[in-house]
Image (cartoon, helix red, strand yellow):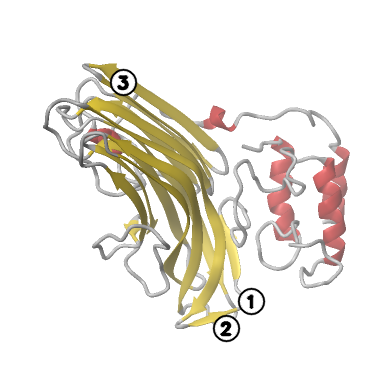
Amino acid sequence: MRNQLQSVSRRGRRAASVMVCASAVCVGGAAWGAISQSTITAPGGFVQAAAGPSTNGGPGWPGGDWTTAFPGTADRQEGSFTGNNSVSRSASFSGSGIVNSASGTVGMGTAQMNASNAFPSTAGFSAGIANGGWKESFVISHASFNGQAGTMQFTVQVEGRLDATGITGSAAITTTAYKDNAQLMSNPLASPGGSDLLSTDRQYGNWAVATFGEGEVTGKTVFDTVTFAVPFTFGTPFNLGVYVNARAGQRSSGGFGTQSTATVQLTRFRWGGIANIYAGPNPITGATVSSGTGINWANPVEPGSCPGDINTDGFVDDADFQIFAAAYNILDCADPSMPSGCPSDLNGNGFVDDTDFSVFAPAYDTLVCP
């Protein structure tokens, strides 16, 4: 291991000022109707943006293929990514008194979205919608509980703004999660936070506004935390997907053709960290959480973060190596001499060891930080 550390150091400062655009690894584009949470391979994710003069319903929940809700002349864009990268897409439409748009950027653990819709009330359910999220592979292990049932309780943090005007404005943000492509069902350890309640047996967060009269103006600032609970078996791999969408739509169609508007700004949607690991009904300590990307999911994820960027300057270079090497000498994150938060513990198992180096070394080779 020590020779490996020295080898990393000798690679030195080559291309230390180079950043590789994460979107360069994205696939997809003008083609549509093909991407959803069930088609994404972990670790990875996707984003969709669609805008058009009419919609014919939708898949119901974030993570479904929302491009299929837009027929005819709508603008539909989608893209996907693999690993710890990101993707952005945008769409817009203008015609017949309707102007709408949508855009979104999704990375591992984070998303930002915008949507807008200006329309006459006689339009056929015009909308701008952004949709997407990420999927990660996990193994949660514990020497005393491997083979037994457990629950991982985690949070997502949601910040944004909803506005609507006129007779039929409608704006909403919704989030949900899936384990192995099956949507998470209600669980006493899950909570929708302070969101608008839905009559459902699924885990979710939902915030919405709508208008019902000429000249009406309404809005809502969203600043909330949703708690999800995913059941698993200790020592057995599983995939977890977290998805969100922003919808600037039309509450109803008809009336006198007067103008309505809807806007959505999802300024911050991020993984808030693992709150607890449960064995049966009891929270435990000492579990090891491993993931396909090597991200330390015990902590909140910030946009642009990536494994190996220990000092969070957007690069994985000698500065990060120096921090990692010093931490490797100490090993145990419980040691009071460790830096606060133990940032070199890249896989979140409580130690800085060879498993963390296996995450750090490939990141140093490529210098990729989305």
Q: Residues within 10 Å of mark 3 (few under 14, many from 20)?
A: many
Q: Secondary structure at mark 2?
A: loop
- Marks 2 & 1, CB-CB < 8 Å contact: yes
Residue named by callout 3: 93
Front of the two marks 3 and 1? 3
Mark closer to the chain start, 2 or 3: 3
Which percent across, then down, holds residue 249? 27, 36
Q: For the residue marked with disc 3, what is the amino acid?
A: Phe
Q: Residues within 10 Å of mark 1 (few under 14, many from 20)?
A: few
Residue 27, by quadrant, is top left
Residues 18 and 177: in front is: 177
Front of the two marks 2 and 1? 1
Q: Residue at x 49, y 31 (%)?
A: 26
Residue named by callout 1: 286
Q: Residue at x 50, y 77 (%)?
A: 278
Q: Secondary structure at mark 1?
A: loop
Front of the two marks 2 and 3? 3
Residue 254, by quadrant, is top left
Residue extending farthest to the top is 95
Q: For the residue marked with disc 2, what is the amino acid?
A: Ser
Judge whether residue 110 can be spotted in this image.
Answer: yes
Residues 325 and 96: in front is: 96
- Marks 2 & 3, CB-CB < 8 Å contact: no
Residue named by callout 2: 144
Q: Which quarter of the rendering shows the N terminus?
A: bottom right
Going by the image, does 41 lie left or right of 181?
right
Q: Secondary structure at mark 3?
A: strand
Above-or-below relation of 187 to 32: below
